[in-house]
Amino acid sequence: MITASEIKLPRLVTALPGPNAKRVVEADTKLMSPSYTRDYPLVAKRGHGAIVEDVDGNSFLDFAAGIAVCSTGHCHPQVVAAIQKQAAELIHMSGTDFYYESMPQLAEKLIATMPGAAPKKAFFTNSGAEAIEGAIKLARYATKRTKFIAFYGCFHGRTMGALSLTASKATQRKGFGDLLAGVEHIPFPYAYRCPHGHTAETCGAEILEVLEQQLFKRMFDPEEVAGIIIEPIQGEGGYIVAPSFFLQELQRICRQHGIMLIADEVQSGMGRTGKWWAHQHAGIEPDIICSAKGIASGMPLGAFFAPAKIMNWKPGAHGTTFGGNPVCIASGLATAELIETQYLENARVMGDFLFARLADWTKKYKIVGDVRGRGLMIGIEIVRDRRTKEKAADLRNLIVDLAFQKGVCILGAGENTIRLSPPLLIDEEQADFAVRTLEECIVEAEKKI
Ligand code: PLP
């Protein structure tokens, strides 16, 4: 029998879902919280590289990577070895109360990838939302201010503080009552739907004007604002790239008023865009950088980073029992090493390869409105009609489902966008297969209009 570690492309051996998958889905439906959002019945059993095998022996090409998490692929041998070695040596100690060598080692390695000469410090968390919670607290602590500005469409997590900044889908907030006071949202620069007709380079000038001329003058005195938080590339909201000038101007505004610029790199960081951090494409230096997802190839780890003069809170001001657990840190060190030596470059090269293949899709397919992103963070926006740009969530969902039926796992993002967020180790053969499969799905979906 061919095992997952020996194959590189999908191999389907049952109708989907297979009998074992059906059984698991049934048990899950009976026992698990209905708040999970499963698009299709993939029941994973094991993974290797960019391949996931399900409980019926079907193998899928994974272009979702566990929501952009398995940066080095599934179960990379070096990551697995690091986890196993660490698990046999020391599983837990709590970095809040005790020391262990690997914590500052990973902090040093990641800080070295960040722009700016000022010495930085790190705090390790268990998740992306916790990294955002920490950033909210640090920004308040450092500025002695309380208010925040965030962007429509952005997703920062589901804990109450992070949820206050999240403005992605109303269902994520509905029913949970009052959130943090003192948070205002402004539009995210969305070039494909820019109301002022700007390009991907210039969209957003009017938003900055609203911020400075309206919000700062009528709502929040900038001296009360602790932080402005932005995803340099909006993830859950639809893989939308913020123009470089926009990020640079935000930095200028933040510096002018002593506001912390917080980059949420939970989805866009750790090499996914072909640079370590997506904000580096714009040449900015955020005050606080949040990371998670790809940081430890699937082990639960997050982090936030800031210059030492900002992260200078008192002992006890912030802490965590599990955050930065030695096993997660070991996985993070192996992940960082692999990204540094191989996958950062591969994300860039494979990103270029994919974008070249997708370049003419907005001409070739009537339902492809926009193709955008950087590196291996690619969004394909599906519309009913390219002229009216009417959003076609149903067609997007159909394409996601058809791709699964053909053995390629993808996820949606935003209302009507397909996201491609494969592990950073994919090769040309896999990228080519995913593109050809997606084309087949798009052609089938087009027949429905
Ligand atoms: N920030 C961004 C940009 C995200 O994409 C996510 C998760 O999708 C989060 C924060 C929250 O991370 P987590 O789900 O690990 O709490």
Image (cartoon, grey):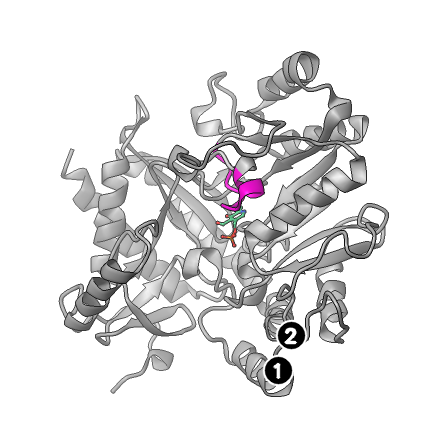
The stretch in magenta equals 153-163
Element carrying mark 1: helix
Indicate the quadrant containing the C terminus: top left, top right, bottom left or bottom right. top left
Residue 369: horizontal and vertical position, in percent?
34, 33
Q: Residue at x 47, y 33 (%)?
A: 177
415 sits left or right of 127 in the view: left
Magenta segment main secondary structure: loop
Q: Nearer the viewer, residue 370 or 147?
A: 147
From this view, report whether residue 115 is shown above or below residue 87. above
Mark 2–mark 1 distance (CA, rounded to whole Å): 7 Å
Side (left or right) of 358 relative to 128: left
Mark 2, other Cα within 10 Å: few <14 / some 14–19 / many ≥20 = many
The structure residue drawn at horizontal position 64% and vertical position 13%, both measured from the top left corner, is 214
The residue identified by callout 1 is 86
Residue 230 image-quadrant placement: top right
Residue 326 is tagged as 2
Q: Is residue 196 visible?
A: yes
Q: Which of the two residues, 377 or 214, is positioned nearer the viewer here?
A: 214
Residue 1, horizontal then vertical, whole percent: 25, 87
Residue at image x 57%, y 66%? 296
- Residues marked 2 and 1 touching at CB (< 8 Å): yes
Task: Kindly identify the amino acid type of the residue bearing the numbered disc 2.
Answer: Pro
Instruction: Decide which of tag 2 and tag 1 comes sooner along the chain.
Output: 1
